[in-house]
Amino acid sequence: MTVRTTSEFNKIYSSATKVWHNAYFVLFYKETKGYNVGFVAGKKVGNAVARNRSKRILRAHFLSNIEALKEGSFVFVAKPPLIRESFETISKTYTQALKRSSVLL
């Protein structure tokens, strides 16, 4: 299920049990039943094309690792350096962040 409304995002932000920062994104995680996921990119990331691209990159990483993730609500907030890095570098950092935040099974 996709997180769509502001109230759903705010609920996850305020009650997140895990928050993980790295150079490319911020992860908010709350343990729930099923998968709820939202992707956010603010204007600091760039224009609309850059924001949409950053959300697509984060979504691709999430979907490629979904079998190895615990169930819960996830919100990924993109940071500006995400657009300038290669997919492989982001993938390595993404996996490290999930391991350190103990979201991987």
Image (cartoon, grey):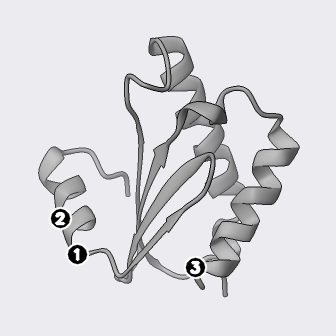
Q: Quadrant of the C terminus?
A: bottom right
Q: Taking 24 as reference, is 85 above or below it?
A: above
Q: Taking 51 as reference, is 35 above or below it?
A: below
Which of the two discs, 1 and 3, labels the residue nearer the N terminus? 1
At label 1, the amino acid type is Ser
Instruction: Please state which of residues 11 and 5 is positioned toward the viewer in this rendering.
Output: 11
Instruction: Please state which of residues 22 and 3 is positioned toward the viewer in this rendering.
Output: 22
Give the residue number, with chain letter if any, for mark 1. 15
At label 3, the amino acid type is Ser
At label 2, the amino acid type is Lys
**Residues at marks 1 and 3, CA–CA distance in whole angstroms:** 16 Å
Quadrant assignment, res 92 = bottom right
In this rendering, position of residue 50 left or right of residue 43: right
Q: Residues within 10 Å of mark 1 (few under 14, many from 20)?
A: few
**What secondary structure is marked by label 2?**
helix
Q: Residues within 10 Å of mark 2 (few under 14, many from 20)?
A: few
Q: Quadrant of the N terminus?
A: bottom left
Q: Residue at x 12, y 53 (%)?
A: 7
Does the residue at mark 1 contact the one at mark 2 (Cβ under 8 Å)? Answer: yes
**Residues at marks 1 and 2, CA–CA distance in whole angstroms:** 6 Å
Q: Nearer the viewer, mark 2 or mark 3?
A: 3
> Which mark, by number, is residue 11?
2
**What secondary structure is marked by label 1?**
helix
Give the residue number, with chain letter if any, for mark 3. 101
Give residue 26's position: percent from left, percent from top: 49, 55
Q: Residue at x 72, y 26 (%)?
A: 84
In this rendering, position of residue 11 left or right of residue 24: left
Does the residue at mark 2 contact the one at mark 3 (Cβ under 8 Å)? Answer: no
Q: Taking 81 as reference, is 3 above or below it?
A: below
